[in-house]
Image (cartoon, coloured by chain):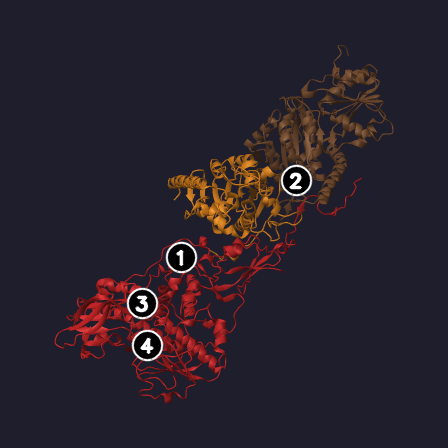
Amino acid sequence: MPPKAAYENYIHPGHRACAGCGEVLGIKLVLQAVGEKAIGVVVPSCIGIIIGPFPSATFKIPVYHPAFETAASSAAGISNALIAKGDEETTVVAFAGDGGTSDIGLQALSGAADRNENFIYCCFDNEAYMNTGIQSSSSTPKDAWTMTTPVGKAGRKKEMVEIMSAHHIPYVATACSCFPDDLRRKVKTAKKIKGTKYIHILSPCPTGWRYPEKLTPNIGRLAVETGFFPLYEIRNGTDVEITYEPRHLPVKDYLLAQGRFKHLSTKDLDRVKEEIDSHWRDLKRRAGSSSCS
Amino acid sequence: MRMLLKGNEAAAYGARLARPQVIAAYPITPQSPIYEKLSEWDGKGTLGARMMRVESEHSAMAACLAASMTGVRTFTATASQGLALMHEMLHFASGMRAPIVMVNVNRSLAAPWSFWSDQTDSLSQRDTGWLQFYVADNQEALDTVIQAYKVSETVLLPSMVVLEAFYTSHFMEPVEVPEQEEVDEFLPPFEPAFQLDPLHPVTLCQTVTQAQYAEFKLMRQAAMEQALQAVEAVHEAFAGQFGRQYSILECYRHEDAEIVLVTAGTIGSTARVAVDDLRATGRKVGLVRIRLFRPFPKAALMKTLMHARRIAVIDRNISPGQEGVFSEELKSALYACDRRIPVFSFVLGLGGTNVSPALIKKAIKMTSEMDQPPMSPISDVEEENAA
Amino acid sequence: MIRRLRPKLDPKKPFVAISSESSLDFKTGAQRSEKPAFINKVAPCRHACPIGINIPAAFHLASNGDFDAALQVYLQDNPLPGVCGRVCYHPCESKCNRGEYDDPVNIRSFERFLADKGHVDVTTRLSPYTGNKSVAVVGSGPAGLSAAYHLARMGFNITLFEARPALGGMLRYGIPSYRLPRSVLDTEIDRILDLGIEVKLNTTIGGNLPWSGLDEYDAVFLSTGLPQGKTLFSSSSLQDRIFAGVDFLADPENSPLKDAGQKTLIIGGGNVAVDVARTLLRTRRGQGGGITLICPESREQMPVLPDDLAEAVEEGLHVHNGWVPVEVKEDAQSPIAVGFRQAEVDRDETTGQIAVRPVGDSYRQYEADHVIVAVGQELAAGVLPEQVDISSGRITIDSFGRTSRAKFFAGGDAAGNKAFVADAIAGGKLGAMAIACSFQAEDVGEQFKACQLGMSKTFSCRHFMQRALMESENLKQIVAYDQINTLFFPPRPRVFPPKEDVQTRRTDFTEVVKGIHPAEMPLEIARCFNCGTCIDCENCMDFCPDMSILKDAESGIYDFDADYCKGCGVCSVACPRNIINMEKDTG
């Protein structure tokens, strides 16, 4: 493993992310792995603000900031333009939030994935429409407080990773901005593959999740270590590989550290534990029966 | 080469000859044959462009725009619901100064559902900052697609070439299809003013301040005004290269006309028969077909119409609560005239209903006979049995 | 005609929102109210180590495979890592923060590993000291060896006096070779002697050389130890069958106690007693049936190191706890009968003093051919200089090893340091500092305070020699377990060193505890948290959302970017080992 200072950054400081933002951390890491020869698509989301107001531009790679639901369709357009120009080296990376992915952007993403368009799609999941002031999205977990679910969200979190996997695209992965080496490795893996690559990046948000901003590293690590957010890859919709074995710490360590979950009862916590256990049994079964070594 | 082509096919030939590098499309009646023709060529390897078979029109425009931002020439086509779905992205494309060319086949907008010709779909997009060309026949369709690229890439605004459902799109006519070499000479490869390029990184389309937005918007206005001259220059160049002369206003027997009929699209083609019939009876009637709607040729219209005694406008569209759009816009152009010319606004052919020469003649007769134009547009026109 | 509305853009420039400028003009640093400070602190293992070895720094270097540099860290303060790596009572491990997480790190085995594997030339003299000062070190046990080593490195001329035929003191004459192989001891002593120390063996000051013989020296360090075993039954007529444990250990192979057929009773509960028992077993080639150990302490109270007692029990030692000897029957014809009463022991944890209370009426006799007494040790009789005060049987010293007589300093067992090798080495080190300060007319108290580790009795040699504490080091702050971010450390069990099989152990002096296998050592090295010691893991840089942790390419020093750091504190949490403090930023 090279010393991390060797990773060059393709994002300038001076950006407008909140202090302690787990999403811009993830963006930084993705860009380190993608490198210089890339074009980014950023749709409205926290990222859209992070890129800065004109002309103060934060990304060092070229970036296009189109309409909200067009992350995947725009990335596909750029990808085809590059092919038309004979450029086989430039990587196209779409940066979208969870709302822009699993809600309004889902059609375009599904269409692009169906056609196996060549780009890396990074969904930065902070589990709500944070940029517009913390409104719930289909990616908001059950029971979470948001401004539009003040007594806790009734429905469950939409399983984007499984949806993308069902398209049988060559590479789907989960990652978390607080596991930097894992995220970088997955982006590098994606970079080498032709076709649609989807990486779902859990991005802790102190502002929306209601925790002291400096704790972002711990919140992200706990999400994974409690088993709440598994780190795994799915290739071609069938081959599952678990990329991190969590310690299965008590899920309340993760949930009750955040103000958006502080109203959860013991019964709720038990239910979540049950769901985590069930999800992991399923993941292990699928990973065990996968053909990859 | 002379070929017997439907309007959709002619548009497709025009598109292919212009050598787009990326095409993104989604099928919708009556546009689908354009998409199918392009796909057929793609299957044979003779298209020359990357063909994106996207999952909605919104994505089609988003993809074209993004490809255009990456420095390539792009093309798409749609109609009606598809155009409406693209609406957000049309504003975006114009705002990004992308020289995209799109063919729109006028079709009624739901509700209720209808497949036939109506101009409301394209006219609803008149504020989006796209150039709009309304064609009356298949030759014009092919030629205008090629011309539109030249204009768009000069002024850096996108262009919409408007056909009509079934009247243009599915009617077969003889069409002169130019040779590729001729088109290449007329229309050189696209040289983007800017693009997404890792060697020269830029950030496109960040948030701007109020004043910055105003400035960018007014620059688009300036580009639109410049487009008037650009279109005329392209018409001249096209005539020089291909021998077919077009103009912003296609005028027919109008110089000494007392009553001038102003219209757009295929009604303008039918109207020539009506004009000839009326002229044969000694009536001094003329026709002005508006070919370029955006930018709206105010000065040209004023100049062309200032000698008319009365004007009749036929709109195959209506903006509910107002009147037909061509009529409304024409009136705004005439407002600066010293003399107030009465304009009689007719709304005919909505939903694709047939506008026959007899109907047109009746409208002109009403224009001649009524004291003054009513406040509301006239839609209650019936053919007379005798001409 | 366009009406210009307060134009912000030059019409010749962008007609569309396109920018090739950066966000560097926006100084987000203006937002912060706190800023990070990068400050190395003291790990609890180092604080607990009597010698104050910078253990996490050594682990860091070893984790990069640089074992020589890691050994060098140990040798800054401890000249005898191979010894301590085998026999130390490892207070470091009992305070190891990892111990609260899963198991403490095997620090002692690590020290041994480095000593066995690394190569360091210690002969570079370190100090700013000039002038030709000489010091006599009297007694070459761990305290004396340590004092000689540190003083020689500081640039002084050293003569090391030793009463016995060879150097090492209790390291050679007390600790059995199955715990400390003689080859290891010799190698360690040779390394010290490479500094150019003059050695005078078989020389007893106050014996065959008078104290006046040391008048030429500018200072004297007394580390004569406690070579004399305390006696029981001193008035008995059976002295030929009562032996001192320390005397037996000094030369077990030539002892009359070798005969396996005999019953031997060992009285005492400390390391000496247990070492006597185990040594006796080996000299009797495993015929241990006649060996019994009795002490007044309970099993848990026995001062012997628990690991050593466990090994002894594995080897078959019979231990009887809770009995205090009260008399010996004066009958020369039969085996010695020693009478015991049941007892309880009250132990003063700070001083180590015990008070034994017979309880109840139980009385029993144990019979044996010989008795070996190992109930403590004393100063050698009559071999101390004038004017050096003694109290409670130890040379009186102040906190820095100064005795009541000018130019005379003391350390080790003789001066009342805790009776462990590490404490003796620490005493030697402290004495060296006091001597050096006395030569320079410096206040040793002030010097000590500047390099003291926390509130411990020890200090950092490196800081004493360099005299410059960097802003990025805080020697007073000890890292507690709750300041370690355990989310960055995967749980992993402790690696244990292999041991010789019991049958072999019972019959010869092969080293019992081996080194951790070199293939497994990296696993154990990786378990160290490196509390308070920056190891350039660069987690801070990796996690900073604002690219505002800077590292100087040449010096490797960390700083924050004042222009952009938002003071979020993520770095302070991402640092797993408590380097980064968030401080108020009023600027």
Of B187 and A85, the residue lying toward us: A85
Q: Earlier in the sequence, mark 1 or mark 4?
A: 1
Q: Residues within 10 Å of mark 3 (few under 14, many from 20)?
A: some
Tag nearer the camera, 3 or 4: 3
Q: Residues within 10 Å of mark 2 (few under 14, many from 20)?
A: few
| Mark 1 → mark 4, Cα distance in angstroms | 37 Å
Q: Secondary structure at mark 1?
A: helix
Q: Residues within 10 Å of mark 1 (few under 14, many from 20)?
A: few
Q: Earlier in the sequence, mark 3 or mark 4?
A: 4
Of C519 and A223, the residue lying toward us: A223
What is the number of the mark on residue C168?
4
Q: Secondary structure at mark 4?
A: loop
Give amino acid for label 1. Glu
Q: Which residue is mark 2?
A: B189
| Mark 4 → mark 2, Cα distance in angstroms | 91 Å
Please state the chain letter of the residue tagged with numbered disc 2 in the rendered image. B
Q: Looking at the colours in the rendered structure, which chain would you say is drawn in red?
A: C
